[in-house]
Image: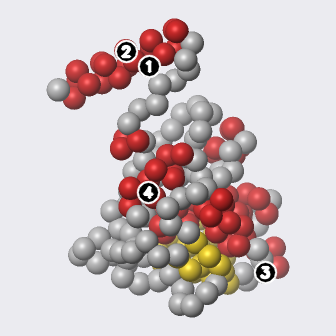
Amino acid sequence: MRFFGRILASAALMVGLVVGYGPVEMSSAAAYHLEHCNFATKHTKRITGHPATTAYRGVADGAAAEWNRSRATTHVTVRGGGVDIVSYDHNYGNTSWDGETFYTCSSRHTVSSTVTANLNRYYADHYTHLEKTIVLTHEFGHALGLAHQTHTGCHAPPIMTPSALQPYHDCGRKYPQGDDIRGLSAIY
């Protein structure tokens, strides 16, 4: 049955392209991937940044603002009562990542501690302020429960691609897209 469904989806895409309607959107359920660990409630997520240098001031604010502009069903704020997500910037050395998110997940698939989103200054020190913000926006997506999603082309590439800066460098996209927002809507 899956094979038959793929054939129908491929046929619908081909008809849409031939007739001139552009790409046909696939089901939103297949458009995003979840981490299977997220906050238990829809309450506003509180973020605080701990910049080690002046070059990183405002990066957490900007990343939180990108999620708030996205009209996602959960909102993030910078500072507030307790903290749900904290961001740090450190030089972690020549690793394979420029940003990484850490959290502890309970047996019920809910975050059971403060989530930490890190920027690796080994790479990010060479980024513009905007690029640092994009990477942290991507990491906040993980903190909120979204996993990586592969995507090709420039038709609304999600911020949650494996390479956070790829949608920006390839397509000029720098903020959460429809698939990212649908993913958060499915969680919260």
* Residue hosting label 3: 53
Residue 40, given in percent of the width and then of the height, sits at 36, 75
Name the front one of labels 1 and 3.
1
Which image quarter: residue 11?
A: top left
Which quadrant, please, contains the N terminus? top left
Q: SS at mark 1?
A: helix
Residue 13 badge: 1
Residue 185 badge: 4
Residue 14, given in percent of the width and then of the height, sits at 45, 14
**Which of disc 4 and disc 1 is earlier in sequence?**
1
Drawn side of residue 89 relative to residue 181, left or right: right
**Which of disc 3 and disc 1 is earlier in sequence?**
1
Contact? badges 1 and 4 (CB < 8 Å): no
Contact? badges 1 and 2 (CB < 8 Å): yes
Q: Rounded to the nearest whole Å, what is the CA distance between mark 3 and mark 2?
A: 53 Å
**Which of disc 2 and disc 4 is earlier in sequence?**
2
Which image quarter: residue 34?
A: bottom left
**Above or below, comparing residue 18 to residue 75 in the picture:** above
Residue 105, given in percent of the width and then of the height, sits at 33, 75
